[in-house]
Image (tube, grey):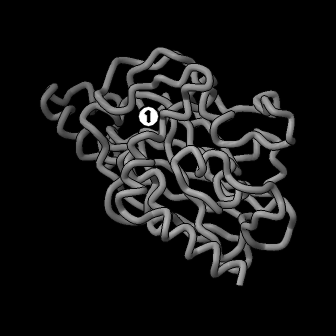
C-alpha cells in the first residue's frame, strides 16, 4: 500500500508509530573501509557492513591481501565512555623508526579493545587474543567474517565512537608469519609469550565507522572499556586479554600454530 502525505496526515499518532516500527526504521546501517593507515606495507584491505538495531550488531567483513592460511585477530577499539578523540594511526606513530607501527605504538591512537570480533563464543576484551576463534585467511589471502553480536546495554547508539583494527601481516612476502621478517613480537613478550613473530601481532588495517567524523567526541557512557590509553601505558589495555590468554593455554596454542607454519 502506498502511503501518501495526505493519508499520513489523516492517521492517528499511534497508528503512525506502529507503522514506523513495522518498517524497521530503527535499524542503522554503516559502511567501513579498512586500510593500512599505518604504512606497514601489509597489502591488506577490507570492507565492512554494519547493521545496528538497538544493541544488536550484525557485521560482515570481506578482505583481501592477508597472510594466507593464517589467523588474523580483529577488534573494535576505542571507548564507549571516554572523552579521548580516538583515530586510526599513521606512520608517524612509528616511535622506534623501524618502519612498522606495532601494537603498542598504535594503541594510544585507536584505543583499548572494547569488542573482540571472534567467530564464536565470547566477544569481550578478554577474548582479544583468542587466536583459535579469530578468522583465518584462505590460501589466496581472502578473509571473510560474518556474525551477529549482542552489545552491552546502550552501546548500539555509540558504535560510531569506535574503530576496527585487523592484525597480522606478511612483511617478507613468504606467505606466512615468521621470525626472519621483523623478529619477535615485543607485544607478545610483554605478556610473557616468547617466540611469536612480530608479523602476527602488528596491525594490518584500520578503519572508522562511516558517518562518524575522525576524532568525533564520544557520546554518553557505557560501562565497558575504560579508554585509558595515554602514552606508553596503553600496553596495559590488553591486560585482561593477556591474563585470559595465558590461563586458556593461548601461549601454547600460538607456539604450536607457528611451529607448524615453519615446519
Q: Position of residue 194 (x, y in %)?
A: 60, 58
- In front of the other: 1 or 129: 129
Q: Position of residue 58 (x, y in %)?
A: 40, 53
Count of numbered labels shown in the rendering: 1
Label 1 residue SS:
helix
Q: Quickly name the residue at label 1.
A: 159
Q: Position of residue 127 (x, y in %)?
A: 40, 53
Which residue is located at x 52 percent, y 17 percent? 84
Q: Is residue 170 left or right of residue 14?
A: right
- Label 1 crowd (10 A; few <14 / some 14-19 / many >=20): many
Q: Is residue 33 left or right of residue 175?
A: left
Which residue is located at x 21 percent, y 27 percent? 10
Q: Is residue 157 left or right of residue 180?
A: left
Judge whether 228 appears above or below 188 on screen: above
- In front of the other: 129 or 189: 189
Which residue is located at x 71 percent, y 73 percent? 68
Judge whether 16 appears above or below 29 on screen: above
Q: Position of residue 205 (x, y in %)?
A: 69, 48
Judge whether 76 appears above or below 231 on screen: below
The C terminus - image quarter: bottom right
Which residue reaches farthest bottom?
263
Amino acid at each position: 500500500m502506498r502511503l501518501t502525505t495526505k493519508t499520513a496526515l489523516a492517521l492517528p499518532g499511534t497508528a503512525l508509530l506502529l507503522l514506523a516500527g513495522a518498517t524497521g526504521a530503527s535499524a542503522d546501517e554503516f559502511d567501513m573501509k579498512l586500510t593500512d593507515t599505518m604504512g606497514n606495507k601489509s597489502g591488506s584491505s577490507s570492507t565492512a557492513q554494519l547493521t545496528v538495531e538497538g544493541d544488536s550488531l550484525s557485521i560482515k567483513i570481506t578482505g583481501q591481501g592477508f597472510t594466507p592460511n593464517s589467523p588474523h585477530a580483529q577488534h573494535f577499539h576505542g571507548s564507549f565512555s571516554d572523552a579521548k578523540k580516538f583515530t586510526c594511526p599513521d606512520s608517524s606513530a612509528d616511535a622506534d623508526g623501524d618502519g612498522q607501527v606495532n601494537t603498542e605504538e598504535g594503541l594510544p591512537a585507536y584505543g583499548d579493545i572494547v569488542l573482540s570480533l571472534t567467530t564464536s563464543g565470547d566477544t569481550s576484551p578478554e577474548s582479544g587474543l583468542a587466536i583459535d576463534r579469530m578468522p583465518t585467511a584462505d590460501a589466496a589471502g581472502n578473509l571473510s567474517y560474518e556474525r551477529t553480536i549482542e552489545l552491552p546495554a546502550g552501546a548500539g547508539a555509540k558504535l560510531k565512537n569506535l574503530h576496527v583494527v585487523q592484525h597480522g601481516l606478511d612483511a617478507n612476502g613468504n606467505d606466512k608469519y615468521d621470525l626472519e621478517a621483523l623478529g619477535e613480537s615485543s607485544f607478545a613478550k610483554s605478556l610473557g609469550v616468547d617466540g611469536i613473530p612480530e608479523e602476527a601481532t602488528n596491525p594490518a588495517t584500520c578503519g572508522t565507522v562511516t558517518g562518524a567524523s575522525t576524532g568525533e567526541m564520544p557520546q554518553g557512557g557505557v560501562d565497558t572499556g575504560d579508554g585509558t590509553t595515554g602514552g606508553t601505558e596503553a600496553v596495559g589495555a590488553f591486560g585482561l586479554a593477556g591474563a585470559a590468554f595465558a590461563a586458556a593455554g593461548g601461549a601454547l596454542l600460538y607456539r604450536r600454530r607457528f611451529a607448524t607454519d615453519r615446519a
